[in-house]
Each structure stands twice: as structure tokens, then as C-alpha cells.
Amino acid sequence: MQALIEAIRSQGHGVGSQIVKVDSFLNHRLDTGLLYEMGKAFALRYADEHPDLVLTVEASGIALALATAHALGDIPVVFAKKSAAANQSGDMAEEKIFSFTRGQECVIRVDLRYIPAGSKVLIVDDFLANGEALRGLIAILKRAGAHLIGVGIAIEKGFQPGGQALRAQGIPLLSLAVIEEIRDGHIRFRDTDQH
Ligand code: G4P
């Protein structure tokens, strides 16, 4: 998606060879117009599958999921939580995921009342790196008895294995920008029109 690639080029910067910082429009300050454009792109790709809800993980995925759900006709968003509430209730599905970026394990949890069995679910997230967050969300969907119709990602890091693993499983994946390489602060993109 050209507008996202332009935003990464003009506002993002590479940190080492692994990380791209996009705090000014996606991870800290939010570019609402760009988020709505991204949501429309996911909606265009997946509307024919008639998803019942959009699933993401807090925190940065929420805005993107909201934009997508709005473009799909204001369907609900469910986000996995990363912290356990003292007054947690309901039938919680929990999955441990390991974040290589943060170097730590965390637990994501969703109240299964909000993912009805048989529902059609679109997963949306801001980054796809090793695919741990998605692995956890997909496991939660299985436990709920829901159907994954596809995945929408804003920025896939193509040099990490998450995207390849999803494609190998035959899971529909739309990544709006795929970064092939970060070197000396320069970010090189894959031609996403091929995907
Ligand atoms: P994975 O789910 O694909 O395995 O990714 P990983 O564990 O490595 O990512 C952990 C967190 O770091 C995720 O955010 C992910 O969105 C983010 N992340 C991964 N690579 C990058 C990157 O190159 N740049 C930036 N800015 N973020 C990256 P999170 O822990 O869920 O945090 P948040 O949603 O609260 O921001």
C-alpha cells in the first residue's frame, strides 16, 4: 500500500538490522487518516468472506482493528489482553507467546464469550515478525471453535519467518507493506503487488 510505504519511508527509521520504528503514525501517535485507509484495504480484501468480528491483540493492533471493523460495516472488535484483571470472569482462553522483539514471554487472553463458536474471524495486527502473536490468536480461535477467514497486517518483516509460516499453512494473508531488509538505516521493501 503506497501511502503506508511512503509514511514508513518519510517518518520511520531502522534500528539495527531488525527493528523499524514507526511511533509517529502507528505505535505511539496515530495517523487516523492512514489508519482508516489501511482498514479500508483490509475490508476490501476480506469483505466477501463476511467476517463476524475482527480480532487483534492490545495495544497497537486496536486502532487498526477498529478502522477495519468500521470499514466492514461496524462489526465488533475483540482484542486479546496481556494483563490479567483481578476481577476477571467468564471462560478465558489463554496462550503463552514469546516476544523475540521484547525478549520476554507473555500471556494473551480472550474471554470466549466474545468469540462465539462458528463465527468467522478476521485477525488484524500492526506488525508481523516471528508470528508468535498470531500463533497465539489462532490457537485461541481454535479453542473457541471459530473460523479464521484471513489475516491483515500493516507491516510484515519479510526477513523474519512469521509471514512465510502463515502462507505455508494456506492462511490468507494481506500485508500492506513488506520490509525485506533494514541496513544502515535504509529500509528496503518487497514489491507487495506480487502478493
Ligand atoms: P511476533 O508476534 O510476530 O512474533 O513479533 P514479536 O513478538 O517479535 O513482536 C513483539 C512486539 O513488537 C509486538 O508488539 C510487535 O507488534 C512489535 N514489533 C515487532 N517487530 C517490530 C518492529 O520492527 N518495529 C516495531 N515498532 N514493533 C515491532 P506488542 O508487544 O504487541 O506491543 P504493542 O502492540 O503494545 O505496541
Image (spheres, grey):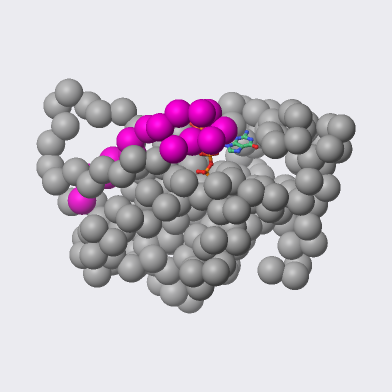
Residue located at (34% from left, 47% from top): 78
The image shows residue 148 at horizontal and vertical percentages of 39, 66
Q: Nearer the viewer, residue 10 or 145?
A: 145
Name the residue located 59 percent from the left edge and 27 percent from the top edge.
Answer: 28
The answer to whether residue 66 is seen in the rendering is: no
Which quadrant holds the C terminus? bottom right
Image location of residue 154, percent across then percent down: 61, 49
Examine the image and state in which quarter residue 194 appears.
bottom right
Ligand 1 located in image quadrant: top right
Residue 149 located left or right of residue 13? left
Residue 32 in the image: state x and y as whole percent. Answer: 61, 39
Q: Which residues are magenta?
A: 98-112
- Which residue is painted at 79% across and 62% down in the image? 191
Q: Quadrant of residue 101?
A: top right
Toward the bottom, the furthest residue is 48
Task: Please say whether residue 157 is visible from this viewpoint.
Answer: yes
Quarter of the picture holding the N terminus: bottom right
Q: In the picture shown, does residue 40 fall above or below 147?
A: above
Q: Give 122 or 102, whichever is nearer the viewer.
A: 102
Q: Quadrant of residue 94?
A: top left
Residue shown at 30%/53% (left/top)? 140
Q: Main secondary structure of the magenta part?
A: strand
109 is within the stretch colored magenta: yes
| Residue 157: in magenta span | no
Query: Relative to 167, is 120 on the left or the right?
Result: left
Q: Is residue 99 above or below residue 37?
A: above
* Count of numbered labels shown in the rendering: 0
Image position, residue 177 (x, y; %): 70, 53
In the rendered image, the vertical position of residue 190 relative to residue 13, given as above or below: below
